[in-house]
Image (spheres, rainbow, N blue to C red):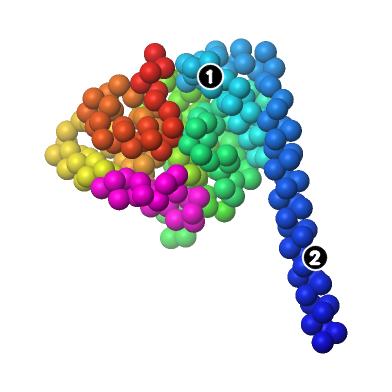
């Protein structure tokens, strides 16, 4: 009985410690989020990230909070021959990633703890020894990998439908439940049937158009699998909202509902 009492005491202490840590973390986030970005930070983002500059004024305060919390929670690591991930680089990456958190109901990216930044496209080798060149990756273990050159290109051109930050962080949302399948956690479980129906039909349509060599508003890479389709769809939603809504209104509607935003009205 004495041993059982000790075990129960240890378990109880562990639970209380976990609860305290979680509350402490939430309190830290609230405090960090209350600190607005400096005027210099805002001017930088308005110049370098057109999507940030296009945000309606009603979102400015929330966006600042999301960015500050992101910078507080996530570490940045230079890779390759990159010497430093500067404050400017961190802001440009965080501002684009946080578009996905702005009104989606998510307040963080799950297990994400680090962003690894290479100066340019980088080479990776898989378990079979096959090498490939990549611009970015999203790992379920808590990291996102980015090419800074691609980040700059994606942030400055907000109308080409290609944005490596938005793409990889869309994967992070998709992977929130531990599976990369193009089916993120939705706000309301009643939304799943319609989401699945629209995504399945839209993915099939893209597969058919790519097989026939026809151009579409969605990048061909989205035909790789449902997870890539969701990431490419997200890029297109933010960067080519008018074209996406015109060509794929049901898909646009689902992404609009998921992200709680309507980029079509930001013009």
Instruction: Indicate the quadrant where residue 245 lies.
Output: top left
Which segment is the magenta one? 175-197
Disc 1 designates what residue? 58
Q: Position of residue 237 (x, y in %)?
A: 36, 30
Q: Is residue 8 left or right of residue 107?
A: right
Q: Position of residue 73 (x, y in %)?
A: 67, 40
Q: Position of residue 63 (x, y in %)?
A: 58, 26
Q: Residue at x 63, y 35 (%)?
A: 70
Callout 2: SS: helix
The crowding category of the residue bearing disc 2, from other C-alpha atoms within 10 Å (few below 14, some 14 to 19, many at least 20), is few
Q: So how many labels did they put on this image?
A: 2
Examine the rendered structure and indicate whether residue 90 appears above or below residue 11: above
Q: Earlier in the sequence, mark 1 or mark 2?
A: 2
Disc 2 designates what residue? 13
Examine the rendered structure and indicate whether residue 45 appears above or below residue 34: above
Q: Is residue 263 left or right of residue 222?
A: right
Q: Residue at x 47, y 60 (%)?
A: 127
Q: Mark 2 and mark 1 in contact (Cβ < 8 Å)?
A: no
Callout 1: SS: helix
Q: Residue furthest right?
A: 2
Q: Residue at x 35, y 30 (%)?
A: 236
As rendered, which of 132 and 32 lies closer to the eye?
Answer: 32
Visible in this render: residue 139?
yes
Q: Is residue 216 left or right of residue 131?
A: left
């Amino acid at each position: 009985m004495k041993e059982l009492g000790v075990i129960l005491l240890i378990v109880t202490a562990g639970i209380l410690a976990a609860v305290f840590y979680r509350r402490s973390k939430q309190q830290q986030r609230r405090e960090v989020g209350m600190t607005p970005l400096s005027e210099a930070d805002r001017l930088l983002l308005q110049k370098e990230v057109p999507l940030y500059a296009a945000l309606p004024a009603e979102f400015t305060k929330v966006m600042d909070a999301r960015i500050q919390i992101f910078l507080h929670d996530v570490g940045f690591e230079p890779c390759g021959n990159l010497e430093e991930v500067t404050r400017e680089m961190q802001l440009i990456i965080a501002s684009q990633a946080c578009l996905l958190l702005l009104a989606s109901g998510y307040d963080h990216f799950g297990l994400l703890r680090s962003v690894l930044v290479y100066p340019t496209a980088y080479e990776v080798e898989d378990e079979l020894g096959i090498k490939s060149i990549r611009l970015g990756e999203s790992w379920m273990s808590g990291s996102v990998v980015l090419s800074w050159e691609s980040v700059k290109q994606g942030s400055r051109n907000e109308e080409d439908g290609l944005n490596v930050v938005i793409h990889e962080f869309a994967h992070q949302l998709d992977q929130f439940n531990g599976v990369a399948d193009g089916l993120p956690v939705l706000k309301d479980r009643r939304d799943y049937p319609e989401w699945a129906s629209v995504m399945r039909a839209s993915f099939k349509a893209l597969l058919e158009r790519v097989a026939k060599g026809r151009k579409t508003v969605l990048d061909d890479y989205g035909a790789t699998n449902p997870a890539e389709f969701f990431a490419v769809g997200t890029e297109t939603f933010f960067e080519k909202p008018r074209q996406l809504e015109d060509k794929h209104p049901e898909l646009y509607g689902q992404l609009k509902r998921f992200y709680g935003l309507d980029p079509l009205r930001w013009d």
